Amino acid sequence: CAEQTPKLESNRSDSESTMPPALRAAWIQQVQNEAGAKYAIVNVKDRRFEFEARHPKQNLRTRFNAESVELSDRDGGAPLRLALTQVNGLDPGAGRLEREGNKVTVHRPEMDEWYVHGPMGLEQGFTIPEPLPTSGADDGVLRLAMAVEGDFSPSKRGKVIVWRGDERALETRELFAFDADGKQLAASMRASRTELTIEVQTARARYPIVID
């Protein structure tokens, strides 16, 4: 996303790519947060999902439930589904879904996972209020793993992950992470056909941490 945060979107512009990271992240947030009613997330009559957003310019429909987010074309074709399955090797816990305007938040026991639907596509982010437990020795790296479902093949183009299907392509790009002091934290992504992993260097970081 998000801006990614990671950000998932079907097209992009490089005109602002030379901005300093902190300024770029703030600009993205402003553009997304100030999106009008046409970007609103609404209730959907589908027992599998609670909310839906349809992008007015991109051929993109997004549906949400407490376990996953699904991106597809406007008719529901070529879906790409993402679900947070592990945080530092542990189950992230059950989520509680909340919607406000063009934002959906999944409140989990020790963190929030959130999505903002706006002009730049679907922005995905995480807010981590304090250090999280880990399944092994603490190596100063926060790891988020998301299961991926869909007929897409990922490839890396610089810092961008491109998901290519038979009829469309989506991008996961512009990953930022900052601590409570506004210090940028080193962050990276990698992907396979079945998993998207985000890693953030958290040694000496002050919480809360925001991944955007």
Image (cartoon, helix red, strand yellow):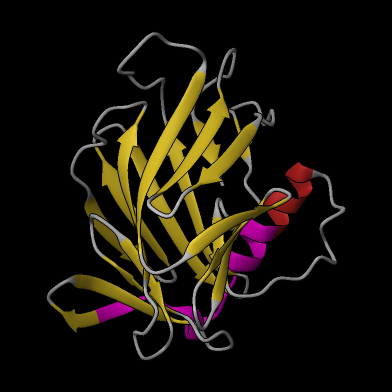
Residue 24: image location, x then y, percent: 75, 52
**Is 91 part of what is drawn in magenta?**
no
Q: Is residue 121 above or below residue 130?
A: below
**Relative to 113, does residue 131 appear above or below in the rendering?**
above
- Residue at image location 47% in from the left, 26% down from the top: 142
The answer to which quarter of the image holds residue 202 is top right
Query: Relative to 74, is 212 on the left or the right?
Result: right
Please state the horizontal and vertical placement of residue 62, each as a whole percent of the image.
39, 74
Residue at image position (59%, 12%) is 204
Q: Is residue 43 left or right of residue 201?
A: left
User: Which residue is found at the position 22% from the left and 48% from the top?
Assistant: 95
Whether residue 33 is visible: no
Bounds of the magenta span? 28-43
Query: Which picture quadrant has residue 180?
Result: top right
Between 96 and 121, the residue placed more toward the observer is 121
Q: In the rendered view, does 199 fall on the left or right side of 16?
A: left
Examine the image and state in which quarter residue 186 appears.
top right
- Who's the residue at 70% across and 71% down the image? 12
Q: Residue furthest top?
A: 137
10 or 57, which is in the foreground?
Answer: 10
Looking at the picture, how far across and down is residue 18, in whole percent? Answer: 87, 53
Is residue 210 shown above or below 131?
below
Seen from this angle, which residue lies furthest left?
47
